Image (tube, grey):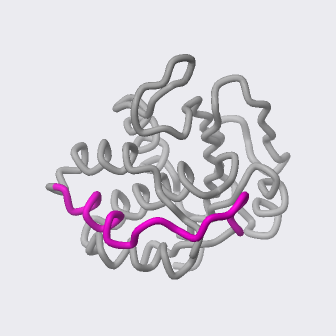
Amino acid sequence: MSSARLYVCSLTRVVETVRDSGARSLVTILTAGASLVRPHEIAPDRHLCIAMSDIDAPVAGHITPEQSHIEQLLEFFSNWDRRAPLVIHCYAGVSRSPAAAFIAACALAPHRCEQAVAQELRHASPTATPNRKLVALADARLNRAGRMSAAIGAIGRGVDCYEGAPFALDLA
């Protein structure tokens, strides 16, 4: 099913990625107070916005990833009809959005091996460095017994960059 595809990009590439992919659902993960864009192709009820900083531990003035963010993501992903692709973006397209895409792939294709999904992610994006806190929270929530965290640990840190290139993951 070619529509069951996740696209990941940075804030600067959202409009173009939505347009080029034919997506009709969008997840935005940005620091609280950041300005956000909803392309006209995305209906308001198909746009999930989560305010969260790209951190692994509490920092004054920032929002640390928490379980409520995972619940929001999982609910949105479970309501995605998969007839059109879904785009996930954060500021740089390197940490929070790749983590969310990995979480979506593991949640929506529970039969898939976490290591295989992580390897696919690395192949699709040499720069992806998924946020470990988000992955660990989802790992516990999805009862993956540490396998999601281990898989992300195994692919290591991505190549340093200012902004990641858009990439796609298939759910099949």
Q: Is residue 61 above or below residue 172?
A: above
Q: Residue drawn at (39%, 33%), measured in percent from left and top?
A: 57
Query: Residue 89 magenta-drawn?
Result: no
Q: Is residue 15 above or below residue 59?
A: below
Q: Residue drawn at (51%, 18%), measured in percent from left and top?
A: 60
The residue nearer to you, when weighing 17 against 150, is 150
The residue nearer to you, when weighing 67 against 56, is 56
Left or right of residue 39, residue 49 in this image: left
Residue 86: quarter of image: bottom right
**Residue extending furthest toward the bottom:** 123
Q: Residue drawn at (24%, 43%), measured in percent from left and top?
A: 141
Left or right of residue 82, residue 105 in this image: left
Q: Is residue 29 above or below residue 15?
A: above
**Residue extending furthest toward the top:** 61
Percent from the top left, x then y, of residue 101? 49, 59
Query: Residue 164 magenta-drawn?
Result: yes
Percent from the top left, x then y, of residue 150? 25, 63
Residue 52: quarter of image: top right
Query: What span is in magenta?
Result: 146-165
Q: Is residue 158 above or below residue 68?
A: below
Left or right of residue 9, residue 141 in this image: left
**Residue extending furthest toward the front:** 160
Q: Residue drawn at (48%, 76%), measured in percent from left and top?
A: 122
Mark count? 0
Left or right of residue 26, residue 97 in this image: left
Question: In which quadrant will I find the C terminus?
Answer: bottom left
Percent from the top left, x then y, of residue 48? 60, 38
Percent from the top left, x then y, of residue 171? 45, 72
Residue 154: quarter of image: bottom left
